[in-house]
Every structure is written in C-alpha cells, then in structure tokens.
Image (tube, rainbow, N blue to C red):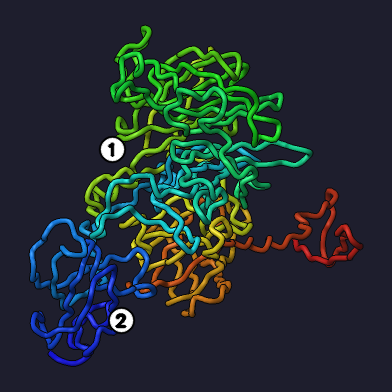
Amino acid sequence: MTGPGAFDGGVLANGGFEAGALDLWAANGSAGLALGSDDKASGACSVHVTGRKAAGDGPIQSVAGAITAGGTYDVSAKVFVETVWTGTPDAANDLMDFSADDISMKEETVVQTHPSGDAAAAKAVGTSNPLMDYQYGADPWAMVYDGRVYEYMTGDGSHIDDDGHVVRAYETDGSGNVKDNSYGRIQTIDVISSADMVNWRNEGAIKVAGTHGAATWASNSWAPAAAHRTIDGKEKFFLYFANSAGGIGVLTSDSPTGPWNDPIGEPLVSSATPGTSGVVWMFDPAVLVDDDGSAYLYFGGGVPSTNGTSSAEQTDHPKSSRVIRLGDDMVSTVGSAATIDAPAVFEDSGINKIGDTYYYSYCTNFSHSATIDGHSIPTGTIAYMTSKDPMGPFTYQGTILANPGTFFGAGGNNHHAMFEFQDQWYITYHSQTVQTALVEGGSLDTEHGYRSTQIDRLSIGADGTIGQATGTYQGVAQVGTLDPYGEVSAATIAWDSGIQDAYQASSGVRVAPQDADDPTGTQVLANVDDGEWTALAGVAFGTTGASTVSASVLPRAGGTVKVRLDAPDGDVVGTLTVPAGGGTSWTTVSADLARTVTGTHDVFFTFVGGADDHLFDVGSWTFTKAAAPATGPVIDAASVSAGGVVSGTRAFQVDLGVRRRTCRTRTWS
C-alpha cells in the first residue's frame, strides 16, 4: 500500500497522500499541512493539520473540470482526532488538530427506486384524452387560428440546462428518486396544435425564462395565455405567462409557434401596477381581444390572511383577481386594474365573450365556506361569473367543471380554458392521467403532481348558461379527416405505444427537436425503439387511393416500419426498410403498398429492430396517390334500321376532344 495510486480517490488526486508529497492539496485559511506517517489510515502517509482558527480551515483541492453537472457524488475521508474542541479559536487557543487520510469523491451510479414497470399507454386507441401521453403539459390555454387549435401548456417536468437545451426530467432527490413537482424549475412552455382535435402535432418547447430564455428577467414560466391581433396591417401573436406568482410577462411573435421575443424586457404586470394591491399571487393570466379591437388581461389569485390565518370573509371573498385594459400594442397596460370579487377564488383566470356577454371563470379554493351568498360552491372547482362589460362588475352564476380527482382519481389543482372551434364549445383542462397510468403499471412509485392536458365538450344553453362538463378519457370526436398526400410531420400523433418513464428516452415514444439548439424548430419522432408505434386517426385516402409510402428518416441502428391499417396489429399494407447509419444524415425511404389503399382509415406505424437499439428518427410521412385508371370512349352498340343487316366492317367517328380518329370495329349478328 505504498506509492502513487495506492488509494482510489475518485475525482480527487493523491487522496491517500501516497505521492510522497502534498501534490494538488493546499491549505485553506490558517491551517498548516504536513505529510506524516504516524496516524495513517492505509498506505504509508497521511496529512497532519494544525493551526486552525476557523471551522473551514484544512486541506482543500479544486475539482473544477472534474465533476459532471447534475451528478451525484459520495465524499468521504478517514480522520484521526488528536485534540478536543477548545472553544472560540484565536491565536492562542486553536481548533483541534487532526490527521486525514483516504479522502475520496466518487460519482455515484444513481438507481431510481421505482421499477421499470409495465404501464399501458394512458390514451387508448379510439379515445382522445390525454392529448399527449408521451410527455407532460399543464395549465392549458387554447387559441384558435387559421383552422387549427393551438394548445399552450406549462412545461411540467422541463427545464433549461446550462447549455441552453430543454431538458425533460423529473425532479429527483440526491439518490435519484422522483420527488413531488415543485414547479420551481419550469422555464418552458410547450405548444401542440391540431386541425381535427385528435391528431396533435408537437410544435416544440418555447424557452421562456432564465438565462437562455426569451425573458431573461424571469425565473419561471407558468400558466400561458395566447392571443393574436392585427397591428399595423400585420398579424401578431402574444404569449402571456406568469413568473411564478410574482408577475406577468409577455412575449411576441409573427407566428403562433415562434420564434418569440420579449418586447419590453420586464414584467408587464407586477405589484407596482396600479390597482394590484391585495393580489396574493400575481399569476395565471387570461387574455381577451374584443370585437372592437380593445384587449384585456385578467390575472391574480390566492387567499389573503392576517397573521397567517385566513378568516371566513377572506376565504369566501378573497378579492384577489384583477382585470386591466391592455394598450393597443398588447404589451402595455392602460389605467388601473379593477377588482373582480369572485367568490372563493383560488387561481386560474379564464375569459370568453359569448354573444354580448363576458364570462369570467376561475378555480375555487380549498378552504372556503360550503355556501357563499346563498350559492353552494364546491372546492377546487371551475366556477364562472358574467358581465356586460369586460371590466365588470361580474355576477356569480355557477360551476362548470369539478376537480379532476372527481373523474380520474388523482386530484390536485384545477386549471382550464374555454374555446369555440367549428361551432362547438370545448373546455381544456389538466389532470394527472399519464402519471396515473405509470403508477398503475408499476413504472412510478406514486403520484408526484405531474399533469397532462385534456379536452372535453362544453354546452352553452340558449339562455347563456354553461352546462356541467364531464372529464373523460374518451374526449372529443375527430373533426374532419387528415390528408395523407402532403408531408405529415411524424410529430403528429393521435395514439402511441406509451412510455414507462416519462423522461427516460429509451422507455417509450419521444418527440424532440431536430436541432437541439432550436426547440421550437422542426420536431421529429426521436429515439425509435423496437416494439414502439405511433398512429394517425381518420386518414382520408379517397377513392383513387394511395400506392406508395415514404418517410424522412435519420438512420441509426436501422430497422423496419410496418404500415398497418386500423389497429396496431392490423393488416400490413407496406414495409419501409431503414438501413443502418451513423445518425448524421437524413434520407428518404420509400416502398410500394401491397394494395391500393382507399377510403378512410386509422394508420399505424409499428417499428421493428434490435431490442436494445435506437433504430432511427423519423421526420415525416408521405403517401402518394395511385395513378388514375386509363379511360376512353366506349361504343356500346350501333343502330340498325328494321329489317337491316349488319355485316362486314362499319366505320365510326369518335370525338376525342383533340382530333378526329376513325375507329373500326366488327359486330356479328
């Protein structure tokens, strides 16, 4: 046990002091260091520490460049104590001397306690909820634009790393075990869109907060709200978000999917905004652009307290919601915010105009009286009020949607938005259905507050009252069909084979940016593995039908794509072969279909390859129409007068629309 390298100090050099010197070790503070051999733990030497005047005085070694960000390390040392603690250290009365040996700092291999499990996909084939079951997304806001519904969601389980890349990962403790969602790391907003309410295209993650976000002044990005408006003849898009509960920010773009920028470099609404005194939580924005072009922002929430205790009046009438008019530029405010006295308000502002009536909706708190002003109001429920003026006052009307725990078991907070699409009203909200599927399948130890977005139908009565909505797995019916003859992004998914670990890339279906530095750029189906599949709903091939299929792919280990109809194990109508490659160059693979596919079908892409291999990535799918059948003139018969005889050859003239031809035929009687 002598000589260099006799003791493994991990990332620490000379941890056993066997180099015969104090190589790479230095003294911190007033400590004196000397190489010794009397009190060694192993080998020939140890370090003797004397002259300490502060608790931090002792041997130090820099580990800069030797450790991995986010890694878990075990630090240990063997210490021989010579003297006892003697009180307050000074020049005459030092802290204890000691000897140290076998100092190590080793990276741990983190083993999460939850098993791999066997979770079924959270969204069954033929159903519509949750909208995504391969990643989380919370606090949804729906914006309808140009024939599509855009859903903007808090990026549950996402953060931006030091290199500026979006990382999807649970919050974990020091041992790598999943812990409850604190929402404190969320700096992104996820966007998906659909033209038919079932096939949802992943548009990527918006980097909002932090050093690498568009709004560098913000630490978090929660609860988005989006709107569009024509300004100076150009359509502009506006995304409002909460910086935790400390203020409302705004981003702008020329597209509903970005890129986004911060036009003002500071909060749009904060505690300095006139009329916000009494707002407990400055968050959860909602935005309305009225018929006359005027715009309004709704925000706030929380239950006030006095000396840490909330009275019945404070829980029943928190008066913590506000509305303020926006400037014509949509990135400034006008005047003072007005108070909305929403009974039992907790969070989650929503706003809609139906006819000439303004509907303010919100989530109730969990500590209010059962009956308020004669109204029976449940806890954690979406309620609504109405007014003839966007600034109020608003009058309480009733409830819309019970807490998600009523329908799906796992409760938690409630967050919603109402919207109209193709003459039907809907409510979008979040639940914990993906997380529940993982728990039930043994892939996660318990619920940790990670949420997923859903949509269900909403009914508006002739008198303007809103009916009670029901949260379901079935969700909504497809509106229209999907055209397969244009390029269809592989990040468009109706159903898929599901996941086992929400953010372990090899454990299920993944969508990721093609360019890691551009999270809102082109999205691809990433890290495809054997046994996984994705599907498109209601694909309309028409009467002519499709004869070939192709895919844009990034080959890795290589494998095949089986194109099936109507079920994951349905008839195989085509097989795409993807060669092995280095994952550096995109290419297109094509195949003839086994038969011309006509009509409307659900289409399933099932992936086959080595069980432990990352097979390939997929950028898009394209079907090609079959050639139209050849057509020409048909002569069914020749007219013969009574008693006449047809024999030999008769000549007919046929107009082909281009030039005349003489066609000959022969008929025997």
With respect to residue 93, does 209 lie above or below? Answer: above
Q: Can residue 142 be seen in this view?
A: no
Circle 2: is it few (<14), some (14-19), or many (20+) Cα within 10 Å?
Answer: few
Which residue, given by chain and number where applicable, does mark 2 sit on? Answer: 24
The residue positioned farthest toward the bottom in the image shown: 3
Q: Is residue 607 visible?
A: yes
What kind of residue is marked 2?
Leu
For the residues bearing labels 1 and 2, Cβ distance under 8 angstroms: no
Across and down, in percent, residue 101 comes to 15, 78
Looking at this view, is 29 or 565 the one in front?
29
With respect to residue 397, does 193 lie above or below? Answer: below
Across and down, in percent, residue 407 comes to 32, 32
Residue at 51% in and 57% down: 491
What kind of residue is marked 1?
Ala
Residue at 36% in and 69% down: 68
Which residue, given by chain and number where applicable, does mark 1 sit on? Answer: 410
Residue 94: quadrant of the picture? bottom left
Residue at 41% in and 56% down: 168
Circle 1: is it few (<14), some (14-19), or many (20+) Cα within 10 Å?
Answer: some
Residue at 77% in and 63% down: 667
